[in-house]
Amino acid sequence: MTDRDVLRAAARDVRTLMRRHQAEASHVAGEWEPPDPILIALAVECDDVVYSQIREAPDLPDRLTAVLGDGWEP
């Protein structure tokens, strides 16, 4: 089981990454681009695990590593 503080930090950093990607895509397109629904879902899943709304999926750490990178630290 992943530490709650780590999951909180991961959710925050996933949202930051999502906003950065959204801003870059909006800049390239010249108009507002919607946020990535996959990143939103991942951040919400982290929040749900932190607040005991759902159990942690066995692949959650792997999915976070795929998005945030191997070198990510909270």
Image (cartoon, rainbow, N blue to C red):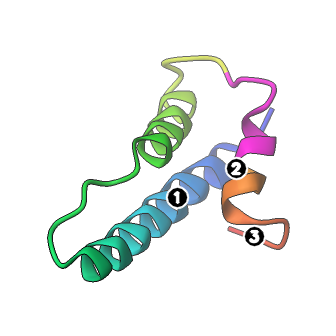
**SS at badge 2:** helix
Q: Amino acid at mark 3?
A: Trp
Disc number for residue 14: 1
Q: Is residue 51 left or right of residue 27?
A: right
Instruction: Reply above or below: 70 against 51.
Output: below
Residue shown at 37% from the left, 79% from the top: 24
Are the residues flagged by discs 3 and 2 in contact, CB closer than 8 Å? Answer: yes
Q: Is residue 33 left or right of residue 9?
A: left
> What's the distance in space between the residues labelled 1 and 2, CA to CA?
8 Å
Q: Is residue 23 magenta?
A: no
Count of labels in the image: 3
Tell me where residue 31 appears, x and y as whole percent.
14, 71
Please state the extent of the stretch shown in magenta in the rendering: 56-63
User: Which quarter of the rendered picture does the N terminus lie within?
Assistant: top right
Structural distance between the alpha carbons of marks 3 and 2: 9 Å
Circle 3 residue: 72
Amino acid type at circle 1 is Val
In the depicted view, which residue is nearer to us: 30 or 18? 30
Percent coordinates x, y for residue 40 in the rendering: 41, 44
Along the line of sight, the residue nearer the viewer: 71 or 8? 71
Is mark 1 in CB contact (under 8 Å) with mark 2? Answer: yes
Q: Residue 47, image x and y in percent?
A: 48, 38
Label 2, on which residue? 64
